Each structure stands twice: as C-alpha cells, then as structure tokens.
C-alpha cells in the first residue's frame, strides 16, 4: 500500500500511485519513452496502462490471449525499439510464453528481447524463480516480474511498480532504443532466419507438434505472409480441431490465390468437421449456416477445378491432386447433419457422383496413390453402394498399413450399417477383432459389433430364422461387451417367442446376476414381456438365500 506519509493520500488511488512512482521511473521513461503493454488479465489491462501513462510513458496497449495477435504486436513494437511489458496467459493447449519467445528469437536480434519484461501472476519459490530466469535467459530475456495471486489489485499494483523501479536501475546499460523502422521482410536481410523458421514449423508438423508449428508459422507470416504459409498454418489449426482459426486462414488464402481449389475445399472440410463438435446442440440456424457454407465452398472448389481443366487440359496430375481435398471433405460429411437443410442430401449426392466420375481414372489399388485419398474415395464408393470396390481398397490399405485397419474397417462397417447392410457390417466387425486395435480401439469396435449384432439378430427373428439369430447373439456375447445383460434380455425374448420358458428364465437369471438392478434400468422397459418373469426369478433368488417365508 502507499505510505501514510504521502502528501497526496487524499487523491484517488491510481493517481497516488502515479505520483509516487513518476520520479522513480523517470530514467526508464527517458530511455524508453514508448511502452508496449499486453495483458491477458482484463482487470490489470483496464488499470495499469492508465497509471503508466501518468508516470510519463506513451503506452501502446492490447488485451489478448491469442498467440497470433500477441506475437504480431510484440514483433512490431520491439522492432520499433519500444519496451514491452507482457502478461501473456494463453488458453490451455494453445502454446506458452516460452514457445512464443522461442519463435521470436529466430527472427529478432538478441538485443530486442532484452526489452521484454514478462509479468507473471504467480508466487514461485526462490529455486523456481531461478529456474524461470534460466529458461527466459535462453532467449535473452533478462527480467521478469511476479504478482501475488489472489492478493488484491492494490497489492498487485504496488508489486508491479516496485518491480519496474528495481528494473529501472538494471536497464541503464541497455542500448538506447533504435529509431522506428519498417518490419523486415524475407527479402530485406532476414531470408535465412525466415527460411529457418519455416523449416522449424514444417518439422513440427511432421512430428505432430501442431502448436509449435502454429507459433513458428505465425511469426513467419508476420514477416512475409503468403498463400502456402496460410494453408499450412490452417492445416495445423485443423489438426488441433481449432476450426475457427483454420477457417480464417483458409479463407484468407483463397483471397490470395483465387485460382486454387484447395482453400475452398478445406473451408468445406472445416465446416463438416465443425458440425461433429456441435452434436447435442440444438442451434438449428447455426447448423444450417455451417452446412450451407460447407456446400457453397465445395461447389466453388469443384467449379474452380473445372475451369483449371478447361484452361490447362486434363491429365493425371489434374485428376489426382485438385480433387484430393474435395474427396476428403465429402468423406467427412455425416448424412445426419444434412437433414437440417432442405435439398442438402441431394446436393451432396450429386457432388459425390460427379467427383467419383472425375477421379475414376485414379488407380486406388496402386500403393503409390496417396493413402488418405484412397481411403476417402473408398468411403464415397461405399456410400454410393459400390461395396465390392470399396472393400477391395480398404483391404489393400489394411494389408499395406495394419495400423489403418481399425479406422478403415470400422468406418466401412458403419457405412454398411447406414445402408442397412447389417450382415456385411457385422462380419467386418468380427473380422476386425483379429487386428491389434489397442484397448480403446477394441472397445469401440466391440460396442459397434454389439449394436450391429442386435439389429441383425432382430431382423433374423422377424424373418423366422432363429438359428441365425441365436448364432449372432452368441457371437456378440463371446466378446463380453459392456451391458451384455441386455443382450441376454434379447435372447430371453427370443426364447419366449419360441415358447421356451425355461430357456428365457435361464437367460434372464444370468442377466440379473450380471446386473441385480436390471429391472430398474430405463432400457429394461422395452422388454415388457420379461417383467413378470423377472419378478418370479428375483423371488426365487431371495428364497434361496433367506428361506421360503420371504415376502
């Protein structure tokens, strides 16, 4: 708190603070008259810059936790020679102060980062502070300030200004800020670092370190933006399921290169991927808007490719590459989403048939053809009822890369289920259990196998083929699926249909041993014919344990 001996304690608190520290910070203001501030904390952002201005600084301030925005502004202001006070706290999984400094260190001269003062809301031990300073020192950042968490704003203000006062003396040996100048582009002496940064980003992409790639791409884009970098950063955002940022990059790329179909196709892909995150949400207008945006961009992609074909002539490259992203986007579409927009299903069906025809000469049985393209095209073939060719492609892919077997066959079987080809889907799931799927993948397949097997067995019962129904149930039970008590209920219902009361009782007894609260479950309500039988079984179980007089 401000000392009681202050002759200006009757003034508003922020004004007191400014008057107290104006003289103390005067040497720093003289050396660095312009201060760039960035706060992620809105409370600090709403007050600190005002006090700093009253002490004599000219402040350029932003409030942001967005890596791209913070990096861009930090680069620009450091390049102009300004001092920077940085309280940066990105959302979880969206980079860090260290990754940002790492990227900037590849582009900016060492002395630039000496003018960065990180501000952290933390109270680390002395040992931890030493570790933090060691990490920051790797990027030539010499100073840092710490504010006590949950200590109240007035205490935090005092800590900040006392910290700046201490830094003031330490900074006296820093070189005077250079004259403001235009940020360098890759053709003004920064080519080597620019290319190095891109190489780092692309290496991170291959290693699936997508946030590191985004950080590096962002700084490179700030130096010299171009179509390829926007597409690649968009791909990194897409891989993190950050579809809004990916959309922004793809759309900006489309403006830079209107003759390319790729950004339109990837906007479409983003839209239909985004819909999968909207499951359970009932914002009908939002879903309709996304579907329409996706379809509009896919139409733009295909019409752009058509124009390219007319201008350049058809050849193998034209057939393989431009349609790859369109095929991927179409394969991503969930038919359930299309019901929200009138005519969307027919539009997608027409697009799918046209794209399959355009890519018909691509040999998807050739291992040299792009793997993802082959998988996605086979998915579209399955949706069009061309199951034999789709299965050939999927089997070849699984043979070439067994790690793809799980997702490939699981998706194929799901497409078969949508087409009511439950028998074929069931056999695919059974076959899939022979592969090494990992525990999580195995559980997904078992659940899909169970649901498909139950549908298939009911269909057999409706047809009067109880032998096949029993075989399907037994196969499902052999994998010990979750909630298998309801599979036993299905089998008990089949026994009742066959007038096999003893068999039904045996199945239901086993189900009750697995789940004693079975009759209380909502799912049990659909087995009305088993309710009385369950009461009798429960009564007999109680009598067996507690005697015949039990009521």
Image (spheres, rainbow, N blue to C red):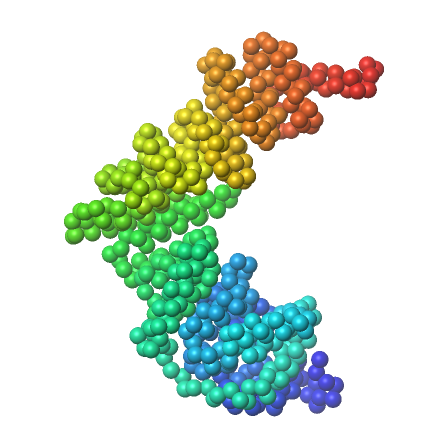
* Above or below for 461 versus 448: above
Q: Position of residue 95 (x, y in %)?
A: 51, 62
- Left of 237 or right of it: where is 438? right
Given residues 131 and 451, the one toward you in this image is: 131
Task: Please state the horizontal and vertical placement of residue 340, each as a whole percent of the image.
Answer: 41, 40
Q: Is residue 48 above or below residue 269?
A: below
Whether residue 115 is visible to the viewer of this picture, yes or no, is yes
Q: Work out whether residue 462 can be spotted.
A: no
Viewer-proximal residue among 470 and 69: 470
Q: Residue at x 62, y 70 (%)?
A: 121
Quadrant location of the C terminus in the rendered image = top right
Q: Residue at x 61, y 76 (%)?
A: 145
Please tell me whether residue 291 is drawn above or below residue 470 in the rendered image.
below
The residue at 66%/78% (across/down) is: 159
- At a point 60% along the width and 22% down the height, the residue shown is 488
The quadrant of the rendering that contains the N terminus is bottom right
Tell me the quarter of the picture where residue 263 sits.
Answer: bottom left
Q: Locate residue 184: give its quadrant.
A: bottom left
Percent coordinates x, y for residue 254 in the rendering:
31, 58
């Amino acid at each position: 708190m401000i000392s009681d001996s202050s002759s200006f304690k009757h003034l508003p608190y922020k004004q007191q603070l400014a008057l107290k520290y104006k003289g103390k910070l005067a040497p720093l203001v003289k050396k660095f008259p312009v201060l760039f501030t960035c706060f992620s904390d809105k409370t600090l952002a709403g007050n600190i810059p005002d006090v700093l201005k009253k002490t004599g600084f000219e402040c350029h301030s932003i409030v942001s936790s967005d890596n791209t925005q913070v990096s861009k502004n930090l680069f620009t202001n450091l390049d102009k020679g300004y001092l920077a006070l940085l309280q940066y706290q990105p959302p979880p999984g969206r980079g860090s102060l260290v990754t940002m400094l790492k990227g900037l260190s590849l582009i900016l001269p060492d002395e630039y980062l000496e003018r960065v003062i990180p501000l952290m809301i933390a109270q680390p031990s002395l040992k931890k502070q030493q570790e933090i300073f060691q990490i920051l020192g790797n990027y030539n950042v010499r100073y840092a300030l710490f504010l006590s968490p949950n200590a109240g704003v007035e205490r935090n203000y005092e800590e900040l200004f006392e910290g700046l006062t201490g830094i003031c003396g330490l900074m006296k040996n820093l070189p005077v800020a250079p004259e403001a100048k235009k940020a360098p582009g890759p053709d003004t002496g920064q080519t080597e670092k620019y290319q190095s940064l891109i190489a780092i980003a692309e290496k991170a992409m291959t290693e699936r370190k997508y946030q590191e790639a985004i950080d590096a791409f962002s700084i490179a884009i700030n130096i010299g933006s171009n179509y390829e970098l926007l597409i690649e950063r968009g791909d990194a955002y897409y891989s993190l399921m950050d579809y809004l940022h990916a959309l922004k990059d793809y759309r900006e790329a489309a403006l830079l290169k209107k003759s390319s179909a790729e950004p339109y196709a990837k906007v479409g892909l983003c839209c239909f991927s985004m819909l999968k995150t909207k499951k359970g949400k009932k914002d009908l207008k939002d879903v309709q808007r996304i579907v329409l945006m996706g379809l509009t961009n896919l139409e733009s992609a295909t019409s752009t490719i058509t124009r390219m074909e007319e201008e350049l002539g058809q050849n193998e490259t034209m057939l393989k590459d431009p349609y790859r992203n369109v095929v991927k986007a179409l394969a991503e579409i969930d038919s359930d989403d299309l019901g929200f927009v009138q005519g969307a299903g027919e539009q997608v069906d027409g697009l799918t048939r046209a794209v399959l025809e355009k890519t018909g000469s691509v040999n998807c049985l050739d291992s040299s053809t792009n793997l993802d393209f082959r998988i996605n095209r086979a998915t579209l073939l399955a949706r069009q009822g061309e199951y034999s060719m789709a299965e050939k492609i999927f089997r070849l892919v699984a043979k070439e890369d067994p790690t793809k077997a799980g997702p490939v066959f699981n998706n194929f079987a799901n497409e078969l289920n949508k087409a009511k080809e439950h028998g074929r889907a069931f056999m695919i799931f059974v076959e899939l259990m022979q592969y090494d799927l990992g525990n999580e993948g195995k559980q997904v397949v078992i659940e899909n196998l169970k649901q498909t097997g139950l549908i298939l067995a009911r269909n057999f019962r409706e047809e009067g083929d109880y032998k096949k129904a029993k075989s399907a149930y037994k196969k499902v039970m052999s994998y010990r699926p979750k909630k298998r008590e309801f599979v036993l209920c299905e089998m008990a219902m089949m026994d009742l249909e066959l007038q096999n009361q003893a068999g039904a009782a045996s199945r239901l007894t086993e189900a009750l041993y697995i789940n004693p609260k079975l009759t209380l479950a909502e799912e049990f309500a659909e087995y009305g014919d088993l309710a009385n039988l369950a009461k009798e079984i429960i009564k007999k179980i109680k009598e067996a344990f507690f005697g015949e007089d039990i009521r």
